Amino acid sequence: MVRISSLLQTATNTVLFTPNKSKVSALTITNVGVMVATMLVGKWILASLPNIEVVSLFTIVYTVFFGSTAFFAVIVFIIVEGIIYGIGWWFYGYLLAWPILFLIAYILRKRANRVNMSVASALFGLSFGMLCGIPYGIMFGLKAAVAWWIAGIPYDILHGVGNFIICLFLYDPLIRALNVVKKTRP
């Protein structure tokens, strides 16, 4: 099992810094910025569709392709969402849910393919309301959290189905596109 502390240490010490560990890599900063931008724009474009989103797909693809660097993109995405929309109870759900998806994708990355990742994305979508309900329960009590989660089950079903379909059709093309970019980079 992957320990979160060792994952964070690896991401901080190995991925983000150059071999001498004294400077942040400009390429890494750029990659994180592009990852966050695509997550934000993708979410914004699909905002009118209830619980249909590409942030899950991007989180999975970026984790498979960039490894632990994607963790920082997830955290920056959450922070920017908080800046844009204000800090509410949903923000704490995001702080829990999105890193969990990153961790799942990170653990599965060695066996990553479109079917495995589509199933993981669907299960994440189905459980998103429950995950976001945990901070809600801490703040307002267990009964309120369960009532909120049950009321949102139709949206979680839509979220799970949408995640599955989006990931099934777009996972491979995005991985191929990232590989092309990687090969053409100087």
Image (cartoon, rainbow, N blue to C red):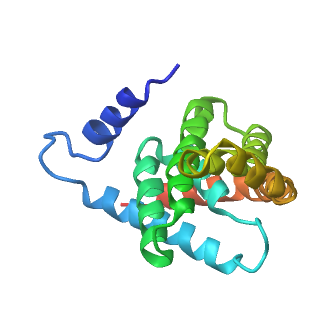
Q: Position of residue 63 (x, y in %)?
A: 53, 46
Give left or right: position of 147 versus 175.
right
Instruction: Indicate the position of residue 136 as horizontal and vertical percent values.
Output: 60, 52
The quadrant of the picture occupied by the C terminus is bottom left
Q: Is residue 68 left or right of residue 63?
A: left
Identify the residue at horizontal 48%, vertical 55% (top origin).
74
Q: Is residue 49 left or right of residue 16?
A: right
Residue located at (56% from left, 66% from top): 39
Vertically, is 125 above or below 104? Answer: below
Residue toward you, 87 or 55: 87
Count the marks: how many?
Answer: 0
Q: Is residue 167 above or below residue 12?
A: below
Quadrant of the rendered image containing residue 108: top right
Q: Place residue 50 in its image quadrant.
A: bottom right
Residue positioned 44% across, 24% down in the render: 3
Q: Foreground residue, 69 or 155?
A: 155
In the displayed image of the protein, which residue is found farthest to the top?
A: 1
Q: Residue at x 78, y 59 (%)?
A: 166
Q: Position of residue 107 (x, y in %)?
A: 57, 30
Residue 122 visible in image: yes
